[in-house]
Each structure stands twice: as structure tokens, then as C-alpha cells.
Image (tube, rainbow, N blue to C red):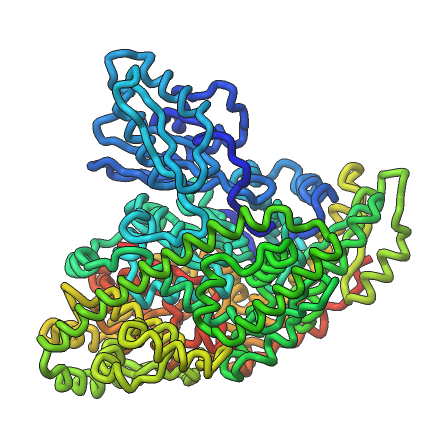
Amino acid sequence: MEDYKFLFKVVLVGNAGVGKTCLVRRFTQGLFPPGQGATIGVDFMIKTVEVDGEKVKLQIWDTAGQERFRSITQSYYRSAHALILVYDISCQPTFDCLPDWLREIEEYASSKVLRILVGNKIDREDREIPVHVGEDFASRHNMYFLETSAKEADNVEKLFMKIAEDLMQQARSKDLLRYDKDTANITGKTSVITDSNCCSRLT
Amino acid sequence: MGSRIRENVKHFFECFCEIVPPTPERDAWILQQFPESYKDEEVLKSIPKFSYPCNFENVVIQHYSFVLTDIKSKWTFGFCRHDPKSQTAIVVLSYLPWHQALYKFLDTIAVLMHSPRAEDLDEFLKTVYNTKLADPGKTFSVPFNKGERTFTVESPKPFGLPSIPENRNLTEYYNAVDVNNMMTVFASMLFERRIIFTSKKLSRLSACVQSANDVIYPMIWQHLFVPVLPMALIDYIFAPMPFLIGVPEDVFKYAAQEVVSSLKKQLKNRSALLGDGVSRAFLRALVQLIGGYRDALEIQPSKEIVFNEANFIKTRSPSLQPFLKQMLHLQIFQQFIEERLQMLNSGLGFSDEFEIEACRYSEKSSSNLKQQYKEWTSTMKKEGTAFFKSVKDKANPAMKSAVRTVKDGGKGVKTAYKGLRAILRDNPSPTQFHNGLESLGDKPRSAPNSPTGKRRTIGFSVPTTSYRKDSLAFRNSTSDRPYSPLSAGSHATSPDASDRSRSDTPGLEIAPIDLMSEMQDLLHLRLDTPPVDRSLKPVRSLENFRNSNSPISSPEHWTFASRSGARALSPSSRLFHSNSNKSQETQNLLLSPDDVLSSPPVPPPRPTTSKQEFFATTPFVVGGGRCENGDPVFYIANHHSVDMVKLSPPTASPRKKVNGMKGCITCFSCGIWCGSCLLLELVYFVLV
């Protein structure tokens, strides 16, 4: 078994055709198990990266057919560490759908999941959503923001590396906290862990 | 939309394949297929994998089904037949979830494969493929063998609930899973957990997973759905999103233990209630839970009907509110509401089984609603909004068939009731036995040797002793028990009286907890009674109890499977223990794949012996993990509390001590309905 210190699960969400799968494939560059998306309905890819000398394994889950959801609900990401919401900068409707996607997330603002908004396809000439519009939206919803091009590999590496770094930092701070706590409590009531230091800008 | 079954299916089947089993040198492969024109590469690549998902014994003819999900989340069903006399397996892919019909089809194919005339099979496949599907409720028949024989299947009627014994899946599910586990599965599905079933028998595995989905009708599972997961795709059990996966037991090596024979005996041979009794029980539970969505509909003339979430919660009884609040935010519920609204807005009205049941549940409010809806539709019609072309065609047959089912259902109840009375006569005094139980029942909860075990008592008021006691009490007092729509008894005694009381209490007045016990009552009454009533055999039961008593109070009897030692200290497992994005530490104990596959916690250690007879008092392990110093730690729950037991140092008891408890691991059965104790993310069921 491959040796790694952290394993993080990342879930991709967004309209069909915004390039979720391309984004992941570009990042993992062939280092993934053969895709089962077409027969299982969910695909995942794995890549191990190194952050501060530690091996971090990212498991990136890519679901097909979310279009049928009116919005994504907490159950969808409650076991994920990070949630990447993708739109296509050259396609207004994919941006217009973002509030729908986010409707549920907003209600659960306390949820610890790391949220990233990604405008993909910046290689396209026919941009419809200016950078600042995406940025505004992200900051209003307390998300990180990044524009990428899966085709040109712009910012793709950066996106996932940032996620890895952030999650690791989070994990470490939680871990430190944990040592102060008594494991005996398993009801989840007292073990409120604050995520104060996970808010560095993702730029 | 939410449905995952394809519409407008043209063929009875999409593709037939004969598969050669894998050898050490080569993966399984397709020997022949029909029609040749079927070209979906991804699917064709997957069929052999799903046809031979693992090594399995093939001593009798086995049928099972798998499901492939396409990019649009629609399901394609694969039906397999493994014959020990044959070198190969045969598989049929279909868009139709008609299990019985397609198994029958496979059997016919198997016969024709041995036909002296080689063309027979080909001709048969061609004719079936090209024959237009029959309308619902009609017969689809295809002559073969030059017209000497005929292959006939019936097109299932729409809105029909799965029935025992006609529906093979449900029959299997009912035989394989006991009532408590059925309810746990049901609740876990409604809460969109990550659910794993495992079994040695592929047929059982696939049937149970399919049925688990069938009984949440009119809900539809929205997430990963894999009734049989091939070995090669085992990583999917680490998916962070909700899933319902059947994993062949072979894959969980550490779980491959001897089947407890007595348990097996107990699970079989049950006198099933014929018809759709089981399905209906679940449907009623859903009506009770969410049927009240109708009270939150906003019907205004000339506007689309909308659902008001806030009103929905507000109008529910306070005890149900936490549960429903949680539920509002689940995919499954949103899909449900959306589909209902679509039905209403397109003029289809309240016509399916669910709505009929909901009407029966609260007649008064539903007649108001119907009146309102009638007015609304007539306005819409006047305004010439053209949504209603198909109203009549669609709604009427459904209504008719529903009325019929209702009548039949009533008969079933009466039969059950008769049997029940017979039993009451035959069984003079069960009291003594139950008192014994009660006092013993407290022991397991104390877990005295768990040094760090802080315990939280969860607001769950199911009787502390076995549910059987409850159901007995009910039997003795059928007459003065207040009406509840889930109790079969009151239906049978006086339908009129219950109707009256029902209309007096519209909406969901019943506490969520009651729902559980009501369901227990119902299922036990209707399913466990004649002719074999296991609950009324004190001698056997007490014996079981003694066995199940010891291990819990003394954790030395618990053990972790070997390998845990060195790795246990690796920081990663500690970290993952804490990393779940919700702060609850009990959640997600299995975040690292290594934890699952190479070190033990799932399934966690089991007490030496214990039988499901005393489910309610017997704690079961709900999860495992490690604490800071690497010591294994696991959680035990029963109906009242969750305890943490820390083992320090890990005991090294021989493995043989750790068995039993099959079929009820990881039943986090406590606060399922209270909504506030969503302790476990992963729910795990072993089907023996």
C-alpha cells in the first residue's frame, strides 16, 4: 500500500460540460484508476502530492448526472473534505446555476467543508463572465476562487495543491486540538473544533 | 428527473452476452453477444467484471442482478445466471427492472442453448428483441421452438407495490433481514447514509439491495447504487457521498467467518405474509413521516402549486420536527417534493399508492386538499393552460388498481389478525419470561470495564427490553390501544372506528419514536405470527440471552483482528480519525482506506455469541477506530445509549472467539428517528 500521511476527499460539482472531468484528468495526468464514470455513475481519481515534505493523497470524486438535482444537499458532501464548484467562464448559464447549487450549502454555513469556486476554460476567447464577477460571487459566499484552464493546464496544479495545503493545515490544527481533548466523548457534543486558520486566500 | 428508471423503453432486453469466467491469466470476457449492434464499449467492458465480481462457489443455479449507472444517472440492469453445469455465465442487459421476467427469460435462454438446433437460440433472441413490449398489466408473449412453446411474461402494472412472494427481491429481503435491521436500513436510506450490505450469496446481496430501494417508494435513492460491487471496484466504498453498495463477502476477507447455523435456521422458514404487506408497512411509515407535505402545499388559482418548507415543518408535531428538518435538506426529499409538484402541476393529481395511503391516513385534511386542488385544476382548465391532456388516461387506471389493492390489503390484515388470536389462545403466560429479561437487560448497557466510557443517553424510548415484549403487550390490549395507522390490529378490529379517530387527528401527531415501535408492532404482528411465532418460545430465548449476556459486560471478550498492532500507531490513522468534516468524532472512522482494508474496525469485533432474538437489549458495535495512543477503540450501542469501549492494551484472544453477531453489525439503531444523533456515517449490514 502506498505510504501517505493524509488522505483527503474532494468532490466536484457543477453543470454538465463545464470541464470537471477534464480538470481532474489534467491534474492527475493518467495516474488514476480506469474511469468507471459511465457505468457506476461516479468516477474518482487519486493523486499523491507532497506538501511540506509530507505525502498527501487526494481522492477526487467526480459525479455524473447531478443535473437532476435541484441543488446539492449536505448529505452529498458531508463526508468530503473539500467541495469544488465549477462553472464555465464562457457560458453564462453555468454561472447562473451557481446559486442553485449553493442554496443548500448556504443554509449549512457551519459545515466544515472547504469550498472552492472555479471558473474553468479561461483558454476560451468568448468569455462571458468577467473575473471580478466570479470573485465577487465567491467572496459573498465565503469561498475561495480561482480561474483555470484544463486545456492549457493553467492553475490546475495550483488549485489542487492549494486544496491539499489548506486541508493539511486544517487537519494539523485539529489534530493539535485533539490532543487536549478526552476521547471519551463520542457524542460529538463537546468536540467543537474551530477552523480558524483555514482562511488563507487561495490566490 | 429523480427517477432512475428509463422511460420509453423499446426492447425487452438490450443485450445478451455469454461470459467466460476469469482464469489466472485472463480476465472474464464476452464469448458471444446479441445483438451484434450493441456497441456501448464502456458497458461491454464492464459486463464481464460484474458477471464474475468475485470468486464464488457455484453449486446451484444462481440468479442475481447488477446495476450499471450511465452518465445521466439512469440505470441499466444486468441479470446473470450461473449454472454449475455450464462453463459460462449468461447475462442479459435490460432497461427494465423486471427481475422475475428477466430471470425467466434467462432460464429459457439456458434451455435453448442446449437445443439440438443451433438456430433456436438466435431466433428466440431475435423475436423477443423485436417484439413490442406489452402495455402494463398485459401479457408479453413470444412463441419459440417453431411455435411449439411460448415465452410469456406479464408487464408489471404501474403503481403496484412489490409483493411477497411474487417479487423475488422483496421475498429474499424479508427472509434475509430481520425486522430491526430492515428498519435500520430504511432509516439509513432516508438519511442518505453510506450503506454497505455484504453477503456470500450474490443472489441475496443483489435482491436485498434492490429491495431496500424498492421499499422507500415513492422516494428514489439518488446516489451511488451498486447492488453487486466487483472486486476490482472495491475503492468505491470509500466514496464520500451517500451510497448503497452490495459487496460480495469474499471481498471482505476478515468478515469471512462461519455462518452461525442456528441463525440461518432462524432467518429461513419464516412464514411470510403474502402480498404487499411488507411494502405497505414501509409505505405507511413514509406516509406518516412525509405524507404531511400536502399540508404545506400552496395552491393558488392561476399559479403553479408550490411547496412551503417552513410551513411543512411548522405544521408537524414538535417531536417530528427535528427529524423532518434534517430531511428537508436531503437529496431524496427534494427529489420527492419536486416530483410530487410536477405531478400536481401537470394535473395528474393525487393518484398513486402513496397518495392513496396518505388519504387513508388523514381523511379530513386530504378531502379539503382535494377540493382545493379540484378548484385549482378547473381554473387552470378554464384559463386554457394546456397541461392536462393526459390526465384521464393516466390517472384512472392507477386509481382503479389502487382500489383493488386496498381491498386485497384488507383481507391480508384480517388473516393476520385471525392467526394472532389463535396464538393468544395458545399462549397462556409469557409474563415470567419477560420479567427475567428486563432485569438482565440492564447489564449490557453498563459496560463496566470501559474506563473512558462516557455515555450519552439518547432520547429514544423504545421499551428497554426486547421489542417482543412490546408487541406482546399490544396483543393483550388490542382493543384499548389508540388508533395508529401503522397498527394492523386496529385496522382489522374496526375499520370504521379507526377511520373516525383518524379524521379527528389529522397530520402527524405521533411521536417519531412511536413510529419505530409501531412499525415493530406491525411487522411483528403481521409477519412473525402464524404459523411459527418465534417470540413465544421462552425456553429458547432465555438460552440465547444467557449467551449474549456475558461478552458485553466484559470487554476482554472483544478483540481486534491481528494486523492492527504496528500500523495502529501510524499517525495517519489518528488523523483520519479526527478529520471528518463534521466534528463528531464518531463519524467517519473509516476515512483511510487502510483502516478499512488492512486493519480491522469494519466489521468490528463481535461478542462471542449473541443472537438477534434480543436485539433491543444486546448492544452492537457501531464503529471502531483508534484513540491517540493507538489503542483500538470502538463504540457499542443499544437502543438507549452509545458507549465507548477502549481496549488497552489490545487483547490477543484467539480469533475463534470473535464470531456470532452476523447480520446486525453496525446497527446504529438508536436515534434514527430523533434526528439529533446522526452518529454514524457508514452503516454496514451482513446478510447471512
Left or right position of B448 against B401: left
Q: Looking at the image, which residue is at 61% across and 72% down?
A: B296
Q: Nearer the viewer, residue B264 or A25?
A: B264
Q: Nearer the viewer, residue B187 or A90?
A: B187
Q: Residue at x 16, y 68 (%)?
A: B533
Instruction: Find residue B280 and report its image quarter.
Output: bottom left
> Residue at the location (39% across, 54% down)?
B161
- Locate residue B236, reporting x and y percent: 49, 48
The residue nearer to you, when weighing A51 against A22, is: A22
Instruction: Count every numbered label the image shows and give the total.
Output: 0
x and y, in percent, of residue B46 in the image: 47, 33
Residue B678 x, y percent position in the rendering = 49, 72
The answer to whether residue B229 is above or below residue B478 is: above
Q: Image height check: is B194 above or below B127?
A: below
Q: Is residue B646 visible?
A: no
Quadrant of the snapshot with the C terminus of chain B: bottom left
